[in-house]
Amino acid sequence: MKTITFLALASLLFIAPSSQESPELKEATTLTESVVTLFNERKFDEALPLAKPALEIRERLLTPGDQQISNSLSYLADIYIAKRNYGDARKFLLRVIENQEKRFGPGDVGLAATLHRVAQLHRRQGDGRKAEEPYKRAIVLREKAFGDDNFEVPRSLAG
């Protein structure tokens, strides 16, 4: 599942960059391409020090809520999940949620997948009580967007 999520996010990376993109943002893109390659090669310790400056560049130069910032945050979360460092992974996923809320609003159904990932991390750490809130929020968002009898709603309950 985590590889699929990472690969799905990685596909967003290869959208053609703007020819007017700053040299620093191009550097962030190059760093992120290396992160994706290293992640797919399971070289998580090598990917991590490249992912951090890519995020720093994007946060400095882009507006809050920008999709590239969310992507960088997600890459870092995926690396920490792969390293079984669920606490740091959760911190980055919570930042993804903040970024998504800035971009789309707190009621956007797109938040449900990230909320589900946060809940799964709580469960992996043996804290089902903390997992409950993000699971419930994901369900509410999916019910609101798709109706309570849609197949998307049970996905919020699957662990």
Image (cartoon, rainbow, N blue to C red):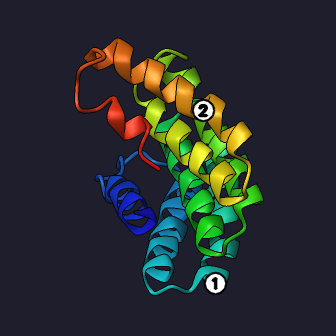
**Label 2 SS:** helix
User: Which of these two is toward me, 62 or 128?
Assistant: 128
Number of on-image labels: 2
Tag 1, which secondary structure? helix
Name the spot of residue 25 as percent of width and height, x first. 54, 53
Front in this rendered view, residue 131 or 92: 131
Using the image as rendered, state which of residue 62 and residue 122 is in the foreground: 122
Give neighbour class at mark 1: few <14, some 14-19, many 20+ (Cα, 10 Å). Answer: few
The residue under label 1 is 46
Q: Amino acid at mark 1?
A: Glu
Can residue 63 be seen here? The reply is no
- The amino acid pointed to by label 2 is Pro
Rendered-image quadrant of the N terminus: bottom left
Q: Tell us which disc is closer to us: 2 or 1.
A: 2
Percent coordinates x, y for residue 136 in the rendering? 55, 26
Residue 29 at x, y percent in the picture: 48, 61
Numbered circle sitting on residue 81: none
Per the image, the residue denoted by label 2 is 134
Residue drawn at (49%, 59%) of the image: 26
Residue in the picture at 63% in, 34% down: 132
Q: Residue at x 62, y 60 (%)?
A: 76
For residue 68, say whether it is visible: yes
Separation (CA) of disc 2 from disc 1 = 31 Å
Residue 146, placed above or below residue 30: above
Asked if labels 1 and 2 touch by Cβ distance under 8 angstroms, the answer is: no
Q: Is residue 76 left or right of residue 26?
A: right
* Left or right placement of residue 159 versus residue 81 in this view: left
Q: Earlier in the sequence, mark 2 or mark 1?
A: 1
